[in-house]
Image: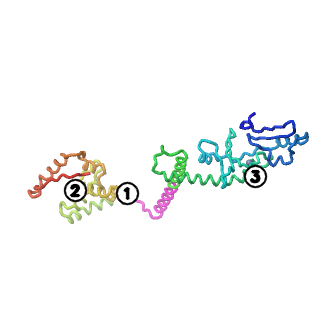
Amino acid sequence: MSNGNKMVSTLVQVHHSGTWNIEIYGKPAKASPIFHEIPKCLDTSSCHTLFNLIETSTHCIGNNGYDKLCRSKSPNNLTMFFNKHNEIEAYEQDLVTYRTVRHMKCEILITQNSSSRCSVCSIYRSYLSTQNSINNKNVLTDATNQKYTRNDLLSRQVLEGKTRKLQKENEQLKRKVQNLQDRVRHVIEEKGETLDEDLSTSFSSVMNDKNNEVMSCFPADSAQRIFWQQQKQAVEVKSKTQRRWHPMMIKWCIALHAKSSSAYRFLRSTNMLILPGESTLRDYTKFSTTTDGVNYDIIRRIKEEMKEEPEFKRNVSLLFDEVK
Ligand SMILES: [Zn+2]
């Protein structure tokens, strides 16, 4: 039977001369402290004691559960752990049903009733745990460094790290949202006012009551007057689709949207003002598709607008320039 055969868990050899040897999973175990009393050359009594000891002992399980750490050191083969003098300190062992990291000085056999691993492997376990957490942190750092790398180009390990990080962030955000919701609920309970039907109708009636006053304040066709009228009309129509916008309102909204689309969206979302939707603005701004060369839609539009302008404004030079 091959000594390296990992299927043989315990191999005991007793020679004619009385010398003996024992291997556990292909590793010599004669030096194990439990055999200290057994002489180099066996007689009937010590042979009996030897087998009795083997029968009543158990294998040190080594340090299992460090597969990830081992694969980070050696992705395809069993790995070795070196000390600071570059000597092998521990090695990974494949025991068919599981893989374990065994210290070079592992006692291999231990008495039953004691813990599942020998004292040497037990001490080494804390070193492995430290290495494991350093390794996990590195994977997380790698994932952070490779934030903008496409997922299909990342290694499995980095992807796992990235997933863990995202899960963590997700949990934190959920907690944050929950906290904010609680705070808002609290503020509403403390300072909130219940709006009833009467109060709601009184808002629109204030607008109607003050309509004449506002109209008299601002001259006809003034921006303020158009704005007031547009807001009033927008409130009165039942459906959004029935809203009709004055060209000046549209121009003003396009200009505002061009300055800052997010500010425009914010203004709309607050309902402080009723403003046309972005798709309505798009209908006006995207009246023509942009292509290279002369855009005849624009020329036609300029011609149309210029018709109404006085003579001196219509005497212009058209300048073609490079536009990005
Ligand atoms: Zn051990």
Give the magenta-colored segment's residue range.
174-198
Q: CA distance from mark 3 to mark 1?
A: 79 Å
Neighbourhood count class around disc 1 (C-alpha, 10 Å): few under 14, some 14–19, many 20 upward:
few
Disc 3, SS:
helix
Q: Which residue is mark 2?
A: 248
Picture disc at residue 44: none
Which residue type carries mark 2? Met
- Other residues around mark 2 within 10 Å, as few (<14) / some (14–19) / many (≥20): few
Chain-order first, disc 2 or disc 3: 3
Q: Which residue is mark 3?
A: 119
Residue 300 inside the magenta-drawn segment? no
In this view, 218 is above or below 167:
below
Label 3 is placed on what type of residue? Ser
Q: Which mark is residue 197?
A: 1
Q: Amino acid at mark 1?
A: Glu
Give the position of the N terminus as an image quadrant: top right
